[in-house]
Amino acid sequence: MSILGVSPLIDSLQIPGGIGLIRAGQSTQNSRGAFVAAASVESNLQPVAAHNASGRDLLQMKEADRNAEAIKVYTKVRLFVSDDGQASDKLRYQGRIWRVTTVKDYLIQGNCYISLATLQDVQQP
């Protein structure tokens, strides 16, 4: 058993049906030297567990993102942030779009990734 033992919790607390993962492809350079954004691909991310971020989670986020609604996501698949040389992954959760802002690798301790994501869109009234 790992130190954190989070991996079995992801399976037992997973969200039925999973979460939509929207991953942008690598941009390409056209004949004029301009970069063209690739199309995004949406897939289903399972198993996954998520809840509202609070407390110390918010301190890990950039100050500009702390006022936005945020969620904490537990996955067994690595999510990407824009610092990784590509566009940030986006998640479709509860009918809303969330941008992944932080990813922590706990594969050795708990066989999972713990990520934070901020709300990108606003619900329609």
Image (cartoon, grey):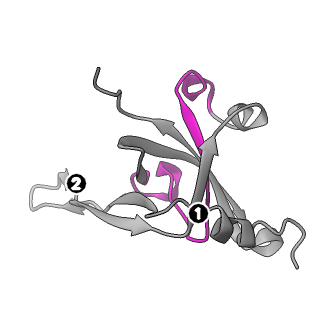
Q: Quadrant of residue 107?
A: bottom right
* Residue for badge 1: 14
x and y percent of residue 58 in the render?
Answer: 69, 32
* Residue for badge 2: 37
**Magenta stretch in the rendered image:** 62-89
Q: Quadrant of residue 45?
A: bottom left
Q: Callout 2: helix, strand or loop? A: loop
Q: Nearer the viewer, residue 48 or 112?
A: 48
Q: Residue at x 43, y 54 (%)?
A: 89
Q: Please state which amino acid type lies under the numbered disc 2.
A: Ala
Asked if 109 appears above or below 99 in the picture, the reply is below
Asked if 108 appears above or below 17 in the picture, the reply is below
x and y percent of residue 117 in the render?
Answer: 53, 43
Magenta stretch holds residue 41: no
Q: Nearer the viewer, residue 59 or 97?
A: 97
Q: Earlier in the sequence, mark 2 or mark 1?
A: 1
Q: Residue at x 37, y 40 (%)?
A: 96
Assign the C terminus to one quadrant of the image: top left
Assign the N terminus to one quadrant of the image: bottom right
Asked if 2 appears above or below 36 in the picture, the reply is below
Total numbered labels placed on residues in the image = 2
Magenta stretch holds residue 65: yes
Q: Callout 1: helix, strand or loop? A: loop
Asked if 75 appears above or below 73 in the picture, the reply is below
Q: Residue at x 39, y 34 (%)?
A: 120
Q: Nearer the viewer, residue 86 or 68?
A: 68
